[in-house]
Image: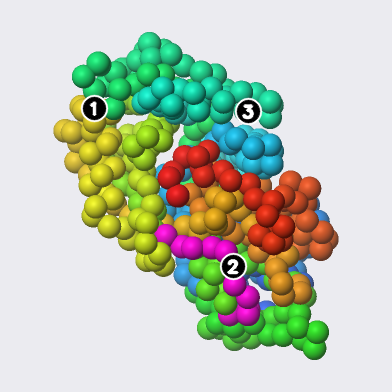
Amino acid sequence: MRYSALALLRGALSGGRSWQPAWRSPEPKAAYDVLIVGGGGHGLASAYYLARNHGVRNVAVLERGWLGGGNTGRNTTIVRSNYLYPESARLYDFSLRLYEGLSRELNFNLMLSQRGLIDLAHSRHDLDSMARWVNSMHMNGIDARLLSREEIAARLPLLDVSPEARYPVLGGFEQPRGGTARHDAVAWGYARAADALGVDIVQNCEVTGFLRGGHGEVTGVTTSRGTIRAQRIGLAAAGHSSVLAALAGFRLPVTSYALQAMVSEPVKPALDAVVLSPGTGAYLSQSDKGEMVIGAGLDLFASYAQRGSFAVLQGVVAATLALFPSFSRLKLLRQWAGNVDVVHDSSPIIGPTPVPELFINCGWGTGGFKAIPAGGWTLAHVLATGRSHPLAEPFQLERFHSGRLIDEAAAAGIAH
């Protein structure tokens, strides 16, 4: 079914009886051309682009829980491409360009809101770093502009820019194309579009091991729902990538941490930009429902848990209230955490693994949501062709042997 105003009217007049399920819930087949492990945004996008770009439709996405129940549903929904190095800038801006046309392509409203993203400078060092950052973005063909203290004050009237502020605001910079998208809608849109092209989405199907052929190549997986064979397998499991790699017999340079977020009670529109304060580790935006969505830094101890520590929560709330004192009147509604996969150079890993016919998309750390379209596009390419996409070439696992790292810790926006 194609969604439209006419379809909505038809559904209303039929009392909802004309609506079809957005995607099927099939039983897994005995064999597929390609298996993708992980039913979050990256896994679903990979399946969609395999079918759409490469015509590979005998594909299954295996999700151990429910669709989008991992990091895709546990983030702060920010999309941006304000990265420092050319390799990262190309990858993330390609993702943002895909986001800009994705609602129309998927026939599903992703609620993309390019309201602009503002980074705050709290010191002279911050100002110097942001000047270099903006110049790098310009050289990489990405729009950005430095902002004075007065321009920021006019744009963010609730921000404390007084001389007595705990975190003085000296200026900052903006990426006008940055903003937010609805995280659930991204997963649902890709799932619906992939399903329409013949992809099987199998939920509640945990991978427990890998089958191997005579030359060491993977030939399938064992799961909680039986054995499934495949010619090629892609892993897109974020914080649990290292667990799956261990099952396959190799080690990833990935450490998993909890990354917290929270939302306040809804209020009338009060914040029309995404605001990041790298100096404090706090970042926030206002959702379409009116909630203040607040993000924190990492809990700096390794964990596979989807919960965070009170100390980090307390610190990010204190920083947010120092920046926006009037928000102290708001009540927090809920708090959660995602399980993020951080690599030593804060850049992703996309491509082949040491195990033949096993490929991986991981290591996005705190930047996975904004990269979903590009991550899916590039993993689909290597799964279909056996060759890495040009955008993914710098992000091979091999770089940890060659030393050609891409250190994006600062541009990631969160102190790793």
Helix, strand or loop status at disc 3: helix
| Vertical order, 282 against 65 (above or below) | above
Measured along the vertical axis of the image, is residue 280 above or below residue 335?
above
Disc 2 crowd, CA 10 A, few/some/many (<14, 14-19, 20+): some
> In the rendered image, which residue does mark 1 sit on?
166
For the residues bearing labels 3 and 2, Cβ distance under 8 angstroms = no
| Mark carried by residue 252 | 2
Amino acid on which the number 3 mark rests in the picture: Ser
For badge 2, the amino acid type reads: Leu
Percent position of residue 284, x then y = 37, 36
Residue range of the region highlighted in magenta in the rendering: 247-257
Residue 120 in the image: state x and y as whole percent: 40, 26
Provide the residue designation for mark 3: 136
Q: Earlier in the sequence, mark 3 or mark 2?
A: 3
Residue 192 horizontal/vertical position (percent): 60, 55
Residue at x-position 80% and y-position 84%: 215
- On screen, residue 318 versus residue 395, left or right, reads left
Q: Is residue 378 magenta-colored?
A: no
Disc 3 versus disc 1: distance between alpha carbons? 30 Å
Residue 7 visible in image: no
Which residue is at 63% across, 80% downward?
249
Residue type marked 1:
Arg
